[in-house]
Image (spheres, helix red, strand yellow):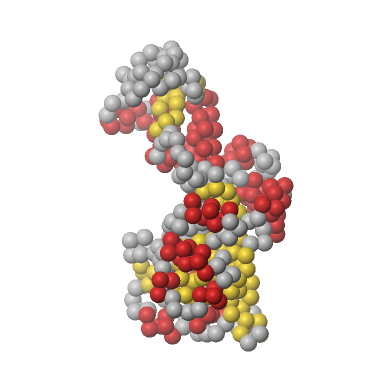
């Protein structure tokens, strides 16, 4: 029993840390009476965690670094991998048996399971669901041209720099996808075996948790001690295109097949949709000619749900909005909107009060129209990509459009709903 207690101490500390993040129940059992061996109050749990055989804070941080390698979704291949492989294998390595389907639920009473309690075991409790799971893999939004009177904006014009404010590309969604692995294996020179998720995650986790002699994670913290110093390369994992939750994917079946064969070339293989960006404001109050919006990319002031329905009605290919931002989700500071000198439109100057301004490059990750509606549109061959954009992206596009420029943008999204 003593050895069993030590093993419980080590593994339980890991599971408690992970369970706070995964919001799922993972329970180890030890001994013939599994209920009495569990700590029954917070003090007992703290005592277990702080014991000599507990997982220390440094090790716990390393484990969490692995869990948070990529996009966290409520379900999907990455969460399944974390639960079934990362956590599950850790339990098996610690000496526990994966109960799996070896027991049968006889009713609602948790003690009424048929199982051989002579061995230490663990199980994962989960809820069966028939809802769709959204699994994004790659996304980009990119200005392809800025013209006025048929003349392309020259790169010597201050407004040209607004491209860099708007453009965003992301591979940082799902570490189990070959797209993610091919990209970051190359970017960080991990040397992982192509297509081997276990090897990739192990090497990526080791890279994130690489430390110098003082214990500082060299790839995580800033390059320097002054405020504003650029952060370490690990920060690039958070450079995500601002797809709304459950937004549609506009990759074609043929493109997806080619990407599966060569995931490292996804940028060139997915064409996406290119269209003119049109400012429509609050779509419920739009009074323009809706027949002119087919194939366009709509810059909106209303919610993604409302924008999606409007886009579907008029035949637009994509919508974008800052509607998810608020004082609650996007704190304010005393800063001017950054951008090239002379690039601020008159309407923005009048609106800006000179004291409080949004964190300009922040875009809240918020919901879209929903997986069912998006999959239906995708199946009909008319996918609509929904974006949550930041204030500086919005302001850059409004500035160009209000000054009479024609802005064309490409949007490309790869992923699956299942």
Q: Position of residue 95 (x, y in %)?
A: 50, 21
Determine the residue positioned at 43% across, 71% down.
283
Name the foreground residue: 95 vs 33.
33
Q: Position of residue 26 (x, y in %)?
A: 42, 31
Determine the residue positioned at 38% across, 20% down.
106
Q: Quadrant of the C terminus?
A: top right
Place residue 211 in its image quadrant: top right
Name the foreground residue: 132 vs 332.
132
Q: Quadrant of the N terminus?
A: top left
In-image side of 349 versus 408 (left or right): left
Place residue 147 in its image quadrant: bottom right
Is 11 situated above or below 136?
above
In-image side of 99 versus 273 (left or right): left
In-image side of 244 versus 174 (left or right): left
Is 149 situated above or below 182?
below
Determine the residue positioned at 50% across, 45% down.
133
């Amino acid at each position: 029993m003593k050895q069993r207690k030590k093993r419980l101490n080590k593994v339980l500390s890991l599971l408690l840390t992970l369970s706070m993040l995964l919001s799922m129940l993972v329970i180890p059992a030890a001994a013939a009476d599994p209920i009495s061996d569990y700590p029954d109050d917070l003090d007992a749990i703290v005592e277990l965690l702080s014991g000599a055989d507990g997982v220390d804070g440094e090790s716990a941080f390393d484990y969490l670094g692995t869990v948070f390698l990529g996009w966290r979704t409520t379900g999907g291949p990455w969460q399944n991998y974390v639960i079934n492989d990362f956590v599950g294998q850790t339990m098996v390595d610690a000496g526990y048996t994966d109960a799996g389907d070896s027991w049968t639920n006889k009713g609602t009473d948790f003690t009424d399971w048929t199982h051989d309690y002579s061995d230490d075991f663990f199980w994962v409790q989960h809820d069966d669901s028939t809802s769709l799971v959204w699994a994004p893999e790659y996304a980009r939004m990119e200005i392809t041209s800025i013209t006025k009177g048929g003349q392309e904006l020259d790169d010597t014009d201050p407004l040209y720099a607004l491209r860099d404010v708007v453009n965003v590309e992301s591979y940082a969604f799902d570490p189990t996808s070959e797209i993610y692995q091919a990209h970051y294996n190359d970017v960080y020179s991990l040397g992982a075996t192509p297509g081997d998720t276990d090897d990739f995650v192990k090497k990526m986790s080791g890279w994130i948790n690489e430390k110098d002699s003082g214990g500082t994670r060299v790839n995580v913290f800033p390059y320097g001690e002054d405020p504003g110093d650029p952060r370490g390369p690990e920060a690039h994992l958070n450079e995500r295109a601002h797809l709304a939750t459950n937004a549609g994917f506009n990759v074609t079946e043929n493109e997806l097949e080619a990407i599966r064969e060569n995931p490292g070339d996804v940028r060139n293989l997915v064409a996406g949709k290119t269209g003119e960006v049109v400012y429509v404001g609050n779509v419920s109050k739009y009074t323009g000619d809706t027949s002119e919006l087919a194939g366009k990319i709509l810059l909106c002031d209303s919610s993604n749900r409302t924008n999606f329905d409007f886009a579907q009605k008029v035949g637009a290919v994509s919508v974008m909005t800052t509607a998810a931002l608020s004082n609650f989700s996007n704190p304010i500071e005393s800063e001017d909107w950054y951008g090239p000198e002379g690039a601020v439109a008159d309407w923005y100057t009048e609106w800006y009060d000179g004291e409080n301004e949004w964190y300009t490059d922040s875009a809240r990750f918020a919901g879209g129209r929903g997986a069912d509606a998006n999959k239906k549109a995708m199946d009909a061959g008319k996918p609509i990509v929904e974006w949550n954009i930041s204030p500086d992206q919005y302001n850059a596009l409004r500035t160009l459009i209000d000054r009479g420029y024609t802005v064309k943008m490409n949007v490309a999204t790869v992923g699956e709903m299942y």
